[in-house]
DNA sequence: CATGAATGAGCTTTCATTCAT
DNA sequence: CATGAATGAAAGCTCATTCAT
C-alpha cells in the first residue's frame, strides 16, 4: 500500500494557511468517510457532513475534482506512513535489523491509523481513470511495496544474512502478512500489537534466515 | 476470500434449464465486468452489454436486485474454488501435507481463474447493506479463511508437526501470501505457477515446522 | 440552414408507436423552448415543463443525451422543410422556374414554422462536440445550402438563362436573403409573405438573369 | 450586425490608463474565446486563461457582471467597424457610390476581423436579459442595420438612381449578403476579398438600379 | 488595483428499480 | 420467459457572483 507519492518534493505548492487548514479538515473527514462507507459511498455530500462544512462546493473549490481530493487523501496518508517508517529504520545497519524495524514500525503505524489505512486501501482499489484502469492499481502498488522492501532483502542475501529465495515474492508476502495482521488486531478475539509484532518478526526470521533447516530444504 | 456460501445445499431451488443458462450467461458477464471495471462501475448496463443481451430488465428479472446478482456471483466463484481445493486435499492425512496441498491447489485455481478472483474480491470489498456495513466484510472473510485453514494448523500443533504460533494469525498470513502471489504471477517479470508453489510451500514449511531455530527463538 | 439529415433513409429505426408519440411531444416542446429561450437556456427542466411531463428523466430516457435530442430536433425540422421544398420544386423544368419556386416554397415554410426555423438556427450555431467545434458549423451549413442551390444556378448558366457569376457566393447570398426576410415579415412594420416573395423573386431575377445591363457591367 | 452602440459618446468615463489596458486585454481575450468556443462556453474561467491572468475575480472586478463584459465587447467591435466604414464612405456623394463604398469597406473590415465578427455575432444571438429576451435581438440588429443602409437606399430612389423596391427588405438583404460572403472567403474553395467585392457590388447594382429590365419587370 | 475564500443554484447524466403487458 | 416505458434519487461539476481584505 505504500506509495512513493508525497515522498520527496520540489518547491512546496505555495498555499495559504487558511487554505491548508481547510484542506486538512476536508482530508480528515474524507478519510473517515472512506473508512466507514467505502469509496463509492464517499460522496461530497457525506464528506461535507462529516467535516461540518456548509456546502459541497467548498470541497470542489479546494480540490477541484473528486479525483484530486482522493489523490490528496492518498498522498497525505502515504506520506505520513512513510515518514514514520523511515524515521524508525534509519538507525538500523543490518538487513535483518531493518526488516524487523520495518515490520514493527509499520504495524505500529497501522494500529494507530486504522481509518487512514482503510482509506488508502479504498482509494487504491477503486480510483479509476476515465479509461477504466485503476489509477493506483495492483501493479503500481506492488511495485511501490516491492521497491521499498526488496532492496533490503537482496542486501541480506548478499551479506549472507538471508537464504536464497525470490526477493520479489518475499517482499509481497511480508507486506501482505503485515496487512493481514490488521484483522488479527481488530477482529475478536484480538491479539495485541506487541504480540503481532513478535509473531510476525519471528515468522519473517524463520522465512528469511539462512539455517540448517532452510539449507537442507532448498538443497 | 473463501466463503462458505454455496458450500452445502439443501433442496436445489427448482429452476428451469433455460433460466439456468441465462443466469450462467449473466454471471459470467458480471464476473468479467467486475474484474475489468470494478464494483462501482459494474452497472446493469455494462453487464448487459458484455452478456450481449438486449435489456437490463433481463438481469433484474432473473436476479431481482443487484445485491442478489452479486451474491450469486460470489457463490458461484467461491463454490467453484472450494470444490477444487476440497478435491485436492481430500487424500492428505498429515497437517503438513494438507497445508501444502491447499497452497498448491489454491494457487492453481487462482492462476486459472484470475477474473473470478478479482470479481470475488470486488464483491467482498464493496458490497454493502443499506446500513453501510460491508456484506462480506473483513471479519466475515477473515473468519471464512481462518475457518478453513486454522483447524489444520491446530491439528499440526497438536500432532507435534508444527511449532507454537498463533494459529489465527498464521492462517491469515498464509492466505494473504497466496493472494499476494497473484501479483507475482501476473506483473512482469513474472514467476511461473510452479515456482510460486515451490517458494510458498517452502516459506510455509519454514514458518510452521518445529525446529531448533524456532525453538530457541520462542523459548 | 437546410441539412441533408433525415433526407433519405434505409431501414426505419424500429420504434414503438407510443415511443414515437412521446418523442414527437418532446421534440415539439424542445423546438418551442429553443425558439423562446435559446440553446443555452434550453434545459431539460424547461423542456419538461413545456412538454407537460413529470420528469426530465423521461427526456433522457427517450433521447439518451442532450446532443441526441438536439440532433433529433434538427433532423425533424430540416426533414420537414426539405420535404416541403422538394414537393414544390419537383414540377419545375427550367432553372429560373426552380429558383423562383424554391424561394417561394422556402419563404412559405419559414413563415409557417418560425419557431422551427429559430430552433434549427440555435442548434446549428450552438451545438458543439467535446472538442469545442461546432457540430453543424458554418462550413457544414454552407455546404448544405450550396449543395441544394448551386446545381440549379450552374444549370441556369449552362442553359444560358443566367449570366456569369460565382455560383457558390450567389447560392449563399440567396439563402441569406431568404433568411433575412424573416425579420421583414415579423418585425413591424411587417411585409406580407406575398410581398416578400415578390420582392425576393424580383431581386433574384435581376441578380441572375442575363441582360444588357449585366453583360455590359461584367464585360 | 452593426450596432449604434459606442457610436457617439458624451463625456468619456474617466478611467485610469492601467485600468484601460487591463480592460483591453480582457476584451481581446473575450473576443477570441467567443469566436472559438461560442457564447455559452465563453466562461470567465476560459477568458481568464486566454488573457493569461490569475483569477476570474479580475474580470468581474473590471466589468462587474458578465453582461457588462459582453456589452463592452460588442461596443468595442461595433465601434471599430463603424469607424472604418464611416471613414470610407465619407467622401461619396451619390447613393450608388455610398452603397458600393459601404459594401467594399464592410467586406474589408470583416475579412480583417473575423474573430471580432464572430464574437459580435455570438453576443447578439445569445446575450439575454433576465426575462429571457435577447438583449441585442433580431429586431434591434435589424433596426441597426436598416438604420444605416436604408436612408441611402431611400435617397437613391428619391434621386432616381434606384428603382422602386422595399427599402427595408433590400437593406436587410444586402447586409445578409455581405455576411454570407464571410463563408465564401473562409471556407474552401475560397474566393478572394477583391473577387467578393466585385461580385457583391455587381449584384447590388443589378438589384437596385433602375433599368429596362427592372422596369419591365415591375410594371 | 488586485486577490482569496466562499457560495448557492443549476445543470446533465447515471443508477437500479417498478409497473405494465 | 421476456420486454418497454417510466421514474425518483442522487451524483459530480461548473457557473457567476459576493464578502472580505
Image (cartoon, coloured by chain):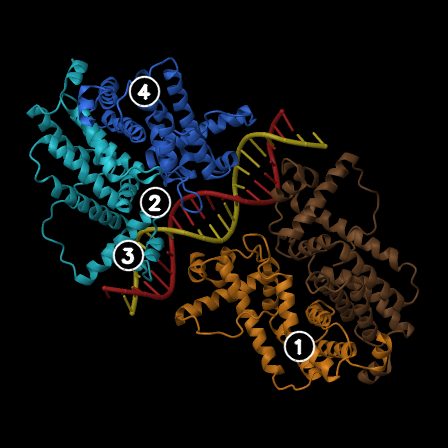
Chain colours: A blue, B cyan, C orange, D brown, E yellow, F red
Label 2 or label 3, whichever lies nearer to me, is: 2
Task: Check if mark 2 and mark 1 are on a common chain.
Answer: no
Examine the image and state in which quarter residue A111 appears.
top left
**Gap in angstroms between the C-alphas marked 2 and 1:** 56 Å
Task: Check if mark 4 and mark 2 are on a common chain.
Answer: no
Rendered residue at 25%/26% (across/down): A181
Above-or-below relation of B80 to A36 = below
The answer to whether residue A9 is visible is yes
**Gap in angstroms between the C-alphas marked 4 and 2:** 38 Å
**What is the secondary structure assignment of the residue under circle 2?**
loop
Rendered residue at 79%/69% (across/down): D199
Q: Which residue is mark 3?
A: B59
Q: Which residue is mark 4?
A: A156
Place of residue B93 in the rendered image (x, y in percent of width and height, measured from the top left): 6, 34
Q: Which residue is mark 1?
A: C151
Category of crowding for the residue at label 3, using alpha-carbon neighbours closer than 10 angstroms: few (below 14), some (14–19), many (at least 20) = many
Label 4 or label 1, whichever lies nearer to me, is: 4
The answer to whether residue A51 is visible is no
Above-or-below relation of B215 to C6 = above
**What is the secondary structure assignment of the residue under circle 1?**
helix
Q: Chain of mark 3?
A: B
**Gap in angstroms between the C-alphas marked 1 and 3:** 54 Å
Q: Chain of mark 1?
A: C
Category of crowding for the residue at label 2, using alpha-carbon neighbours closer than 10 angstroms: few (below 14), some (14–19), many (at least 20) = many
Q: Which residue is mark 2?
A: B38
**Gap in angstroms between the C-alphas marked 3 and 4:** 55 Å
Q: Nearer the viewer, residue A74 or D45?
A: A74
Label 3 or label 4, whichever lies nearer to me, is: 4
Looking at the image, residue B103 sits to the left or right of residue D190; the answer is left
Q: Chain of mark 4?
A: A
Amino acid at each position: 500500500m505504500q506509495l512513493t507519492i508525497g515522498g520527496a518534493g520540489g518547491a512546496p505548492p505555495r498555499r495559504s494557511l487558511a487554505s491548508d487548514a481547510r484542506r486538512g479538515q476536508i482530508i480528515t473527514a474524507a478519510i473517515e468517510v472512506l473508512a466507514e462507507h467505502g469509496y463509492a459511498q464517499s460522496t461530497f455530500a457525506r464528506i461535507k457532513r462529516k467535516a461540518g462544512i456548509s456546502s459541497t462546493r467548498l470541497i470542489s473549490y479546494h480540490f477541484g475534482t473528486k479525483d484530486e481530493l482522493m489523490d490528496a487523501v492518498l498522498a497525505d496518508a502515504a506520506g505520513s506512513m512513510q515518514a514514520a517508517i523511515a524515521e524508525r529504520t534509519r538507525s538500523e545497519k543490518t538487513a535483518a535489523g531493518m526488516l524487523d524495524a520495518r515490520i514493527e514500525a509499520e504495524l505500529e503505524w497501522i494500529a494507530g491509523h486504522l481509518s487512514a489505512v482503510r482509506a488508502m486501501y479504498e482509494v487504491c482499489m477503486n480510483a479509476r481513470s476515465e479509461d477504466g484502469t485503476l489509477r493506483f492499481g495492483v501493479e503500481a502498488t506492488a511495485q511501490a511495496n516491492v521497491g521499498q522492501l526488496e532492496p533490503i532483502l537482496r542486501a541480506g542475501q548478499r551479506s549472507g544474512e538471508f537464504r536464497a529465495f525470490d526477493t520479489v515474492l518475499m517482499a509481497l508476502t511480508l507486506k501482505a502478512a503485515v496487512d493481514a495482521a490488521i484483522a488479527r488486531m481488530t477482529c475478536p478475539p484480538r491479539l495485541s500489537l506487541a504480540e503481532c509484532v513478535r509473531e510476525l518478526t519471528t515468522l519473517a526470521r524463520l522465512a528469511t534466515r539462512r539455517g540448517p533447516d532452510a539449507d537442507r530444504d532448498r538443497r
